[in-house]
Amino acid sequence: MNVLLDKLEERFQRSNRVFDSGMVLTEMVRISSEYAATLSARNVRLAACGERIWVRVEAKEESVNLLFSGGENSALAG
């Protein structure tokens, strides 16, 4: 059971990236675009809530969640 839980935790950490530095919008777009290109994304979704921006990059083999907070991103939510 512990081995399975460790594998789930490792997979969760690989598929989620958090950016709390309050980066500007252009940097958020650059990072999201790089993930989409690297994974050969089939779908990219975006949602805003308060000062947080969530981007899900979905590919055939793997999906990644990107979470951005602060900075210019708060302008998207308002």
Image (cartoon, helix red, strand yellow):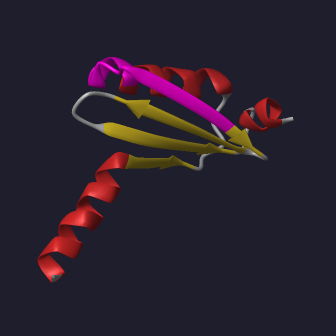
Residue positioned 33% across, 57% down in the render: 13
Residue positioned 23% across, 74% down in the render: 5
Residue positioned 28% across, 25% down in the render: 39
- For the N terminus, the image quarter is bottom left
- Residue 37: within the magenta? yes
> Which of the 4 image quadrants contains residue 75?
top right
- Residue 16: within the magenta? no
Q: In the rendering, at what x and y percent does residue 68 appear?
A: 60, 42
Q: How many marks?
A: 0
Seen from the viewer's position, the closer of residues 56 and 20 is 56
Q: Is 50 located above or below residue 47 in the figure?
A: below
Q: Is residue 4 left or right of residue 16?
A: left
**Which residue extends farthest bottom?**
1
Q: Is residue 35 left or right of residue 60?
A: right
Q: In the rendering, at what x and y percent does residue 69 appear?
A: 66, 46
Q: In the rendering, at what x and y percent does residue 14 appear?
A: 29, 50
Q: Is residue 38 left or right of residue 27?
A: left
Q: Is 1 located above or below residue 48 in the figure?
A: below
Region of the chain picked out in magenta, as a range: 36-47
Q: In the rendering, at what x and y percent does residue 30 appear?
A: 50, 21
Q: Is residue 49 left or right of residue 32?
A: right
> Which of the 4 image quadrants contains residue 78?
top right
